[in-house]
Amino acid sequence: MAKLLEGKPIAEKIRALLAQEVIELKAERGVSPRLVALQIGENASSEVYIRNQKKAAESLGIEYELRSLPEGTSQAAAEKAVNDLNEDRSVTAMILQLPVPGEIDAAKISGLIAPEKDAEGMHPKNIGKIVLGKYSIGPCTSMAIMELLVSTGVKLYGKEAVVVGHSDIVGKPISLMLVNNFATTTICHIATSQLGHLADHVKRAEILIVAVGKAGLIKGDWISPGAIVIDVGINKVGDKIMGDVEFDSAETKASFITPVPGGVGPLTTIMLMRNTIEQFKAQARAEKL
Ligand code: NDP
């Protein structure tokens, strides 16, 4: 039976280390990191993220501000808000809260965030650093997955890793991180499934990462004995939240498996905070040059 890979205890350990780091940085620089979340319009689903971010930031001594632009804000006004935050030296990191109203081009707004203030690690320049294998920040979900893998103590070197899902936010960056760690990495996507090859790839996986958003896509009997299974998927099925992997049958074959909910999710906000702190440190280094 697999060991459960729960995010919360790992998040708590990282939180304690980061809190100490913020105390030291504040003593050194006289100021704390300051994260601004930019929200455009109102959206009930972002409220819970905002609450979690605020709580996590405050527990670490990071200043957190929610800057809300009203419903009906124009694209030009939203772009100006980002440019103003870029120019405000007291703001050390920012995040665009998604979703935004339909008339707003979120990709364009995100792309305007200065790479050195990008808390989500999604700016092309920051993604580029992952490609080059030289990064201290990265997309929060991928960074969370790496922490879960590290917590198993299993070396990735030469392991067969299979990533299912190739989104810009999860599948692609985690694949690059696995390659940077010398895992032999296969990326599966919709075409893999449509041509009937998904099961064959999954069966080879010693490390399996699934980020698709389809409940039960990965059958338990596809799991290779002893595999590490990280299920990123979040699917509402009736009144339950389920992952993309058939948990009950996969658990009997895997060595480690994430529960859904409770695996990747609890780590993502702390990764956002770590990105915020890393950006603050990089800004301090740049000022010294
Ligand atoms: P996207 O919808 O952006 O990407 C899904 C990916 O899965 C795409 O690459 C898609 O390919 C691929 N795909 C779709 N159907 C299949 C299939 N049948 N077989 C193989 N691949 C398929 O989703 P995200 O990456 O943003 O998120 C994935 C899941 O992870 C969602 O459930 C989301 O809610 C969850 N999530 C959880 C987080 C957490 O904190 N726990 C954080 C982020 C996401 P194509 O585009 O070619 O169709």
Image (cartoon, rainbow, N blue to C red):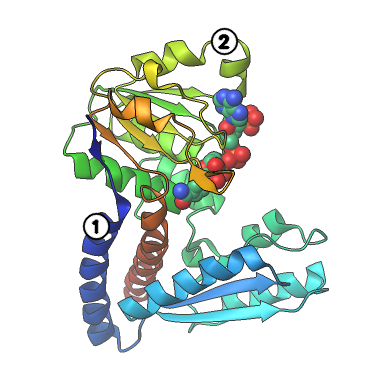
Q: Is residue 41 left or right of residue 85?
A: right
Residue 9 is marked as 1
Q: Which residue is mark 2?
A: 196
Vertical arrangement, residue 33 with respect to residue 172, above or below = below
Q: Quadrant of residue 81?
A: bottom right
Mark 2 and mark 1 lie on one chain; the one further toward the N terminus is: 1
Quadrant containing the N terminus is: top left
| Residue 175, percent from left and from top | 42, 33
- In three-dimensional space, the C-alpha distance between marks 2 and 1, rounded to whole angstroms, equals 38 Å
Residue 92 visible in rendering: no
Report the front residue among 173 and 162: 162
Report the front residue among 252 and 75: 252
* Mark 2 residue crowding within 10 angstroms, few (<14) / some (14–19) / many (20+): few
Query: Residue visible at 49% across and 33% down?
Result: 244
The amino acid sitting under disc 1 is Pro
* Mark 1 residue crowding within 10 angstroms, few (<14) / some (14–19) / many (20+): few
Quadrant containing the C terminus is: bottom left
Query: Residue visible at 23% across and 23% down?
Result: 226
Label 2 residue SS: loop
